[in-house]
Structure formats: C-alpha cells, structure tokens
Image (cartoon, helix red, strand yellow):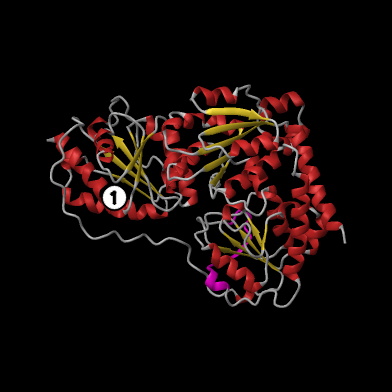
Amino acid sequence: MIGDANATCCATLVDEWIRCGVRHAVVAPGSRSTPLAIALAERDELQVHVVHDERVAAFVALGLGLDGIPAVLTCTSGTATVNFHPAVVEAGLSNVPMIVATADRPPELRGVGAPQTIDQLELYGRSVRWFHDAPVPDEADPAGWRPLAQRVFSTADAGPVHLNLPFREPLLGTVGELPEPIGPPLPVPRGMAASGPATEYDRQRGVIVAGGRSGVDPDDVVALAERLGWPILADPCSGLRGAANAVDAFESMLRYREFADAHAPEVVVRVGRAPASKTLSQWIARSDAPVLQVGGPGVVDPDRNVAAFCSLDDLQALAGAGNTPWMARWRHAADRAEAAIAAALETELSEPSVARATVVASSSVDGELVVSSSMPIRDVEWFGGVTARVHANRGANGIDGVMSTAVGRALLGGPVFVLIGDIAFAHDSNALLALRHRRADVRVVVIDNAGGGIFNFLPQATALSTERFEQLFGTPHDTDLVALASAHGLDATTVDSLEQLRERLAVSGPTVTRVVSDRVENVALHDELHAAVAAALSTR
C-alpha cells in the first residue's frame, strides 16, 4: 500500500541516519511531510524539535550543525521550503552540515495547479552540496533507501544537502520490514588542495590573521605562530583570543597610522575567513604583502590578493622572525592598547562595554556567545578582549536567524549568550515562540538604538539630510522589545547600568535584557576609544 511504502521508506532513511550519527531533527509542522515527521518522532535516539516558523527552524538546524553533525530539517511542500533558503545559504557559505529533507507532491501533481505545490527542484541552487529528487516510495526500489541515506549524510559533511521527498496519499501507513543495514558511509573529502611549500614567501615581518570556520586546529595555528615569532590577529570567531601570540585590539592599533605604517607586514598568513575589520583589510592591501590562505570555508579571497592557497604543512619551511624583536613590539603595543580599552570601558554603560561584559559573562561560565552581524560583531572584535570566543553567521553576514541559531546551540545543552541589535532581534522574533518550554538556557542582550546603528558609521550619515537618513537607513521601528519578549512569557527587562547588566547575565535563561543606546553618541564613543588607544601607543 502507498501509505505503508511512505512509512517504511522514511523509517529506513531515519534508521540509517541514526546509524551514521544523527542525533537531532527539526520539524516545521505540515501535512505532506507526515511520513518523515512521524518516522523522526518515533525514534527515542533522536531529539526532535518542533518549530512553527520554517525560517526559524532552518537556523535552529544551522546552530545544531555547527559542531559538525548534521541535523535533519524537514517541512511540508510549497512556500514552506522557500523559507529554509536563508539558512541554507549561510550553511553553504560556512560549510555547516545540514540535511534538508523537503516533502513534495508527486510528479503527477506538479505543474497542474495543485494546491501547495511549487517547483522545488534545485530550489537552493549552488548553496547545497548535492540535490536529489527521490522517486515516490511506492515506485522506488527499497534496496536503494539505505544507500541514499548514506550518500545524503556523507555529502552533508561538507555543507547542506537537499533531499526532495515526494509522497502520494495516503500519508499515514504502517512501517513494514526495513531493508538490512549495510556498511558505514565513506566521508566526502573536503578542503582545498595545497599549493606546496611556501619557501618563496619566507619573510621576517609576518602576521597571521585568524578567522572563523577554517577547519584548522587552533592549537596548530598557535604552534606555527610561536615557531615563526609572528602575531596572531585573532578574530573572536577563530577561537584564538587569549592564545599565545594573539593580538585582539588590532582594530584600534591599526587605526593609529604611525603604528600601522611602522608594522606593515611583508607576508600575511590568513587562516579561515577574513575578520569583519575593514581597517585590517585596508592595512593588508596597503602593505602589498602576499596573502597565503589556509583553510576555508570555500574560496576566501575577497580582496583578490591571495598569492597561494596553502596548508599549515606548506608553511613549516618558513624561518619567520628569528631572533628579531618583531613579536615583542606587537606584544608591547597590544598590552598598552588593551589597557587603554579596559580603562575606558570599566564603568559606563555603552555598546562597546555591553559587548565586553557579555563576553566576560559567557566565558566565566564556559558558555557560548552568539553575536549578530553589523555593530555587535564589530564591538566584540574590536573591544571584546582576550576571552572573546564567539559564533557569528558570517558566511552571508546577514542579520536574519541570529536568535534561531542561538536557540539551536542552546538545545545542545549549556548556557548560550546572545548579543544582538534591535532590528535583528525583531526580525527573528519568531524564534521566541515556545522558547520558554524548551530546555534552552538562552541569555539575550539586545542593544536598542532605535534602528540600524551601523549606518551611522557610514558616509550616508553625513551626506544625507537627517530626515532622509532616518527614513532609509536609521529606520526607527518603535517596537517595545521588552513587551515583545514578555508576550512570549519570557523574563525581560531594561537595564541602565553595567552592574545591573552583569547581574542579569548571571541569571539562567531564557532571559531578554534590553540596553538603550543613542546611535549618534555611539559613533562619538567609538572615536574616543580609538583615540585612547592611539594616545597609549604614542607614549614612549
């Protein structure tokens, strides 16, 4: 019977995915996905998370997959599948494993005006590592179900995979005998081919720029930096803040032109993606130093200045700084810069001090910190300090899905802190649905500056009239964010001091803490912080 074929096929797929190591599934409710949803829910080995909003569900799956094991993500047919797309794009650009299993109408209902039917073939384009439109189960050879599940899982090791599953009615049925298990899947190799030994780039004055999602062991990066005597300009997404040779205040240091010119590199090793800092990328470009790129995700060459794509093994022949004072000079300057920033952010509540306090709170309890794009990630990168270790969706750099990604991380256990702006929080507010019923210790800090704070740092802020700027870029929304969170039954409040913020961050979640900021004053404060670092570096 058709229903029995649907049920047995899905039970087989799920059984094989469990054998491969899948432990989480995210289900966006709907009818056509009934066979797979039931197959997932019937297995005690899986934690099944039901999420009402498909966009939120997909980012939750993204958060679950950041540790390297894909979650199964499923929904019904139609526009529900389209709402997965932003998270699939982010997963594709960041090499995050994800099994996207969309339900679909059978071929005879496609293109004839059947309800809730769209063209789902190749829906996510090149964002997925593989797309497969499966045959309807009652026409398929059951012997192919386990190999299909294995191929989906092994290919998803390198990023999202889209499996389109058409089902005929009836959607309910009885699970029959499953095909026998087969051998384990072979992992799909990933990574970029190395170019070979990099001896032609052997220089004394080098720097290592460390970003996120590199696929490279941080300990190996530290070992290389110590052997070469080079500083690590460490993005907080790299996991290298606080490591030996790591420099975390590089943004303000490089804004001081005298220091930047005196410490121009002769070669740059970049591990993973580039940090958010435009100052850093412009400094590298101005130096005309060759960039040796190590690790992904994907091709990382936004400034078209990569001289070679390498592995860490290729760099072992480099001699580095030798007995020169290169690293000592960087360390001396970094210590001064960090002291200046710490002193300036010690007492007053501001966007940079909130970022720093959230970093400290998350690291003090060995928690995770998920940071939104735009100003929050920059404040953590520039002023977060030596303990800043975070995740940010920097593949596409979007503000969507930040809360949902954090929920996905929290569902794995342990406290997850979130630093997010007001627009990004409101944009992803559906992540708050049923959050208080989940076992998720999420502690959210919302910077509410009534709009798009990053735009006040851009030329539009001074080139346009205040009215036009606010209309198109400032975009105040007048949403009561505390009321919004409270409507979902969450513990939400506004704080007006660093002491109150620190007290809130110590409370187990889910909680939402709002901090009010003024966008214009925030720009001036950033200028003052960079000036304080410049003054510290100029002191002999």
- Could you tell me which quadrant the N terminus lies in? top left
Q: In this view, does 225 lie to the left or right of 53?
A: right
**Can you give x and y, in whole percent of width and height, for residue 216 in the image?**
51, 62
Report the span colored magenta.
Answer: 301-315
**Can you give x and y, in whole percent of width and height, for residue 350 in the image?**
72, 37
Total numbered labels placed on residues in the image? 1
Q: Is residue 313 magenta?
A: yes
**Can you give x and y, in whole percent of width and height, for residue 233 in the image?**
66, 59
Q: Is residue 198 left or right of residue 4?
A: right
**Can you give x and y, in whole percent of width and height, for residue 272 in the image?**
56, 58
Query: Which residue is labeled 1 in the image?
Result: 18
- Residue in the picture at 26% in, 45% down: 14
Residue 264 visible, this orientation:
no
The relative height of residue 324 versus residue 497 in the rendered view (above or below) is below
Residue sitting nearer the eye, 324 or 81: 324
- Residue in the picture at 43% in, 60% down: 190
- Residue in the picture at 60% in, 41% down: 373
The relative height of residue 191 versus residue 376 in the rendered view (above or below) is below
Residue sitting nearer the eye, 223 or 315: 223
- Residue in the picture at 75% in, 40% down: 347
Looking at the rendered structure, the kind of residue marked 1 is Ile
> Which element is circle 1 on?
helix
